[in-house]
Image: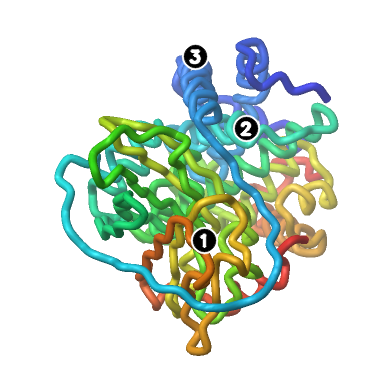
Amino acid sequence: MNNSYGTDEYIEKAVATHSKRLLSAAYAVLKSTASAEDAVQETFIKLITKQPHFNDSEHEKAWLLRVTVNISLNMLKKAERNNPVTENEPVYTEDNSFQLLDLVLTLPVQYRTVIHLYYYEGYSIKEIASILKIPSATVGTRLARARAILKKELEEGAYEWL
Amino acid sequence: MAVNEKYKEQINKVEFNSNFEKKTVALMKTQLERKGRIINMKKPVKIVAVAAAITSLLAISVFAISVLLTPGEVAKYFGNDELAQAFESGEAQVINQTVEDSGYIFTLEGIAPGKALEYIDSAAVDVNRTYVVVAMQKADGSEITYDDSVTFIPFFEGYDPWKVNGLHLGGASAHKTIQNNVLYYLWDFTDLEVFADRTIYLAGFGGIAPGPDKFVLNADGSIGFAEEYKGIKVMFEIQLDAAKANPEKANEMIENMGR
């Protein structure tokens, strides 16, 4: 894949193509739109400063997602060190009804990251393991536990589980 | 509705700053311009060394030179505002130790272990590198040029300097500039802090290779210049927080050297 990092065209295309998915991934981790924007900007800066070689557009997408998730997790750790919060505390509700997203955001960060990559990006367990650099079995366990929590909390029959 | 569709639908409704893409593109272009400027000034150095031994001596004096740019100003000149801020705020160490040798005055201005700057969370500062600012000027005040440049390499007490040094452990690069007849270097080396349980030396010398014709490992583990070496001899001792040492990681780095 030819990455013309130094051109305006490459920068504009990369931002237009990937911003939405990276912001969503960062939001799933950070639960804050402002922090998600910071994390994604940092990711794009890394893209042009590190200038990694990509085999194809899927490789580029996976790299960007991994960097975004890692930056987001680091930001979360720093924020929690400075201002500890209790995990599993709901922070996003529109009308007091526990929607699916609200519930996902109450999951521990390891679970909601996997849920996001599985349900939003459509990655397989193996692909998520490759992106997060963790064993497939760990991804499978996190996914199963996250689903079990969500199923328990959501109204029975409300969603069709894949 | 399938859970993936519902999840997508809901997360896609989350609203981000409408100018995000525009601002990000502008930020990336600025960063790229800055990177290009730094690359043009960079003089990367990578070397391979050999083996042998003998001893040396040199004179170290400590005095202040008020006309020098501060390490923060040097970092800022090279476009690294985050590093500059770390020096100005005291997160990085300002040292100002001076050595005079061969008609030159060398000042170790400051050192910033990347790990200590982890809080900066910026692409401009790599937490796995250590940043060092050194100034060099002619003792008689005459004009200095880039031809006067010397090489600086970190060594570690107890290790043969030509076998284990900051160049072999992850390479080194320097940004250089001459301002008001002072040659400033902003070096970045591998993470030196992992070796903080021993004396860390920063040696300056002519040429590139830190061979046994220039350096010796003494019986007590200290490192000095070889007696027969007649070139520029600068040897600073760097004191880092010993509590931050990581001998396990240091051994791993040495084992992986050159792979």
Q: Residue furthest top?
A: A9
Which chain is indicated by disc 2? A
**Labelled pair 1, 3 in contact (Cβ < 8 Å):** no
Q: Residues within 10 Å of mark 1 (few under 14, many from 20)?
A: many
Which chain is indicated by disc 3? B
**In front of the other: label 1 or label 2?**
1
Which chain is indicated by disc 1? B
Specify the quadrant of the image occupied by residue B170.
bottom right
What residue would you read off at disc 3? B22
Residue at image point 56% right, 58% down = A108
**Going by the image, does B27 lie left or right of A142?**
left
Q: Would you place residue B95 above or below residue B178 in this image?
A: below
Residue A58 location (% of width, % of height): 81, 32
What residue would you read off at disc 1? B191
What residue would you read off at disc 2? A47
Q: What amino acid does circle 2 point to? A: Leu
